[in-house]
Image: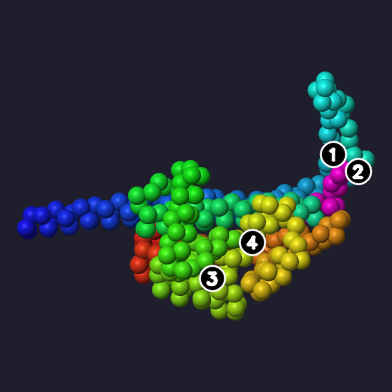
């Protein structure tokens, strides 16, 4: 009996060690994606500003730095040939306008970074759920089918708990985590910062809404969506974003450059603390963070 018990303990340790190794690997995938985005934004934001200042100080600088037009071929569906057509309105960047154009450039780059960071977070959460609760399923990072299978299992569990498996803004993931852990449920109720009222659950709702705005609405924010944001996370949103109107009178998502990198750090706080609690850990040593 003693030999069998020792063998069982060894097997349990091997399974535990493999799980810890796998969740660390999942974290490394998340960290590399998010840290790369953060480092690029920090470097190029400062380097571009220095480069523009240096360029503007040159006495021989040209008045117009760049110009472009909007082209498209008028293709004949029968012959597959056509003439190149252009719109009458041209785009031009002048030396004196470099600062403004660089801000616009960083606005859309930053919006794309929100998309990449959210996707990395979503994959990390699904991998953690897979390892912790559904280890017999395929790793969700491997394929779209594997992601769909994990989501089906999450929704099936919620159904057994008489919980509406609402997939809008990935709410089903949050509901699943809350039902699996009272510590996670408590964490999600906490304000994300002491000077803000938005809690972690509504922060996740906000970044899910932002992902949809960028991926599916071309950064255009409708009045309904804006009202939804204000009802969930007004203070954190107003601290990091503005909504200038374009030429067609649509509100567009525009990150505030000086504040935005503080916003991305919140993704990391949410990610590591949620997964830490999922594994019943008290600190971040599970991710080799000291």
Along the polypeptide, which appears first: circle 4 or circle 2?
A: 2
Q: CA distance from mark 3 to mark 2?
A: 45 Å
**Bounds of the magenta segment:** 89-99
Residue topped by disc 4: 209
Q: Regarding mark 4 in the picture, which secondary structure is present there?
A: helix
Quadrant housing the N terminus: bottom left
Where residue 24 sits, quadrant-wise, is: bottom left
Residue neighbourhood size for the residue with mark 1, other residues' Cα within 10 Å, grouped as few (<14), some (14–19), many (≥20): few
Which disc number belongs to residue 9? none
Along the polypeptide, which appears first: circle 3 or circle 2?
A: 2
Q: Nearer the viewer, residue 162 or 111?
A: 162
Q: Position of residue 65 (x, y in %)?
A: 83, 43
Q: Nearer the viewer, residue 241 or 50?
A: 241
Q: Nearer the viewer, residue 194 or 231?
A: 231
Residue topped by disc 2: 89
Q: CA distance from mark 1 to mark 3?
A: 43 Å
Does 223 sit above or below residue 213?
below
Which residue lies at the image location 73% right of the left edge and 66% below the top edge? 224
Q: CA distance from mark 4 to mark 2?
A: 33 Å
- Circles 1 and 2 in contact, beta carbons < 8 Å: yes
Residue 261 vs residue 103: left or right?
left
Along the polypeptide, which appears first: circle 3 or circle 4?
A: 3
Which disc number belongs to residue 200? 3
Where residue 258 sits, quadrant-wise, is: bottom right
Which of pointers 3 and 4 indicates the residue nearer the eye? 4
Residue 1 vs residue 173: left or right?
left
Q: CA distance from mark 1 to mark 2?
A: 8 Å
Q: Position of residue 141 (x, y in %)?
A: 46, 46
């Amino acid at each position: 009996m003693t030999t069998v018990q020792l063998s069982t303990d060894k097997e349990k340790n091997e399974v535990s060690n493999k799980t810890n190794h796998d969740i660390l690997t999942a974290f490394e995938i998340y960290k590399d994606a998010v840290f790369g985005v953060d480092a690029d934004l920090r470097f190029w934001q400062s380097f571009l500003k220095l480069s523009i200042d240096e360029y503007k100080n040159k006495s021989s600088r040209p008045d117009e730095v760049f110009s472009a037009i909007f082209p498209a071929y008028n293709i004949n569906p029968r012959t597959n040939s056509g003439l190149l057509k252009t719109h009458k309105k041209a785009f031009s960047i002048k030396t004196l306008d470099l600062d403004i154009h660089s801000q616009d450039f960083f606005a859309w780059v930053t919006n794309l970074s929100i998309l990449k960071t959210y996707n990395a977070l979503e994959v990390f959460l699904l991998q953690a759920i897979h390892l912790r609760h559904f280890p017999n399923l395929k790793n969700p990072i491997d394929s779209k089918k594997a992601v769909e299978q994990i989501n089906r299992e999450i929704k099936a569990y919620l159904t057994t708990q008489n919980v509406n498996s609402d997939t809008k803004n990935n709410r089903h993931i949050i509901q699943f985590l809350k039902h699996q852990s009272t510590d996670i449920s408590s964490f999600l109720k906490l304000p994300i910062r002491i000077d803000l009222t938005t809690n972690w659950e509504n922060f996740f709702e906000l970044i899910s809404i932002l992902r949809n705005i960028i991926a599916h609405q071309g950064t255009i924010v409708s009045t309904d969506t804006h009202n939804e944001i204000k009802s969930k996370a007004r203070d954190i949103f107003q601290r990091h974003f503005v909504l200038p109107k374009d030429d067609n009178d649509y509100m567009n998502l525009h990150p505030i450059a000086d504040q935005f990198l503080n916003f991305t750090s919140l993704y990391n706080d949410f990610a590591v603390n949620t997964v830490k609690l999922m594994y019943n850990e008290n600190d971040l040593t599970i991710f080799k963070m000291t």
